[in-house]
Amino acid sequence: SSTRVVTVLVLLQYNSSTRVVTVLVLLQYSSLRRVVTVLVLFQYSSSTSVVTVFVLLQYSSSTKVVTVLDLLRYSNSTRVVTVLVLLQYSSLRRVVTVLVLLQYSSLRSTRVVT
């Protein structure tokens, strides 16, 4: 017989002094052979007009791990969008990592791609 576990966690938070709304969602499925994790964090600050979204996706088995990490940040006051993406694949023989950073500012007309 195999054991499967499903975990769901949802957190909602509002801080009235800083005027920050936070939403955290965690989904996880695990069995004897694999684990799948999805983590999403959303945060909005009305005082600074900044939106932040963080996403983590991960699949792991006995022989490999695949991870996708994404961070998106937007500031309305400075009109700057920042996106950071990390992709990683690892197995018993190799590890491949890709990191991408994009930044766009409509006020200063600057774009950074790494």
Image: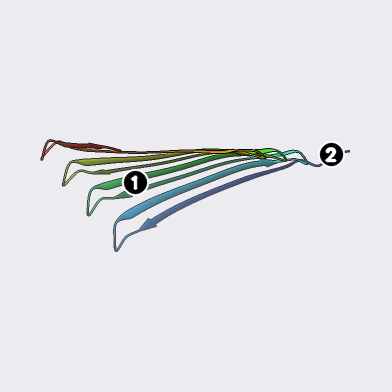
Q: Neighbour class for label 1 at 10 Å: few (<14), some, many (≥20)?
A: some
The residue sitting at the bottom extreme is: 17
Q: Position of residue 50 (x, y in %)?
A: 26, 48
Q: Secondary structure at mark 2?
A: loop
Q: Neighbour class for label 2 at 10 Å: few (<14), some, many (≥20)?
A: few
Is residue 20 rendered to the left or right of residue 61?
A: left
Q: Position of residue 98 (x, y in %)?
A: 44, 37
Q: Which residue is mark 2?
A: 2
Question: Quarter of the image holding residue 18?
Answer: bottom left
Is residue 49 rendered to the left or right of residue 33?
A: left
The residue sitting at the right extreme is: 1
Identify the residue at horizontal 17%, vertical 41% (top origin): 79
> Can you say which quadrant of the picture contains the N terminus?
top right
Instruction: Name the amino acid type tagged 2.
Output: Ser
Q: Nearer the viewer, residue 48 or 16?
A: 48
Q: Report how far apart the C-alphas of labels 2 and 1 lie in the structure.
A: 38 Å
Instruction: Name the amino acid type tagged 1.
Output: Thr
Q: Which residue is mark 1?
A: 52
- First along the sequence among labels 2 and 1: 2
Mark count:
2
Q: Position of residue 99 (x, y in %)?
A: 41, 40
Q: Position of residue 75 (x, y in %)?
A: 23, 45
Q: Nearer the viewer, residue 15 or 87?
A: 87
Q: Nearer the viewer, residue 50 or 97?
A: 97
Is residue 65 rendered to the left or right of residue 34?
A: left
The residue sitting at the left extreme is: 108
Identify the residue at horizontal 34%, vertical 46% (top origin): 52
Is residue 39 rendered to the left or right of residue 35?
A: left
Identify the residue at horizontal 78%, vertical 41% (top origin): 32
Q: Secondary structure at mark 1?
A: strand
> Can you say which quadrant of the picture contains the C terminus?
top left
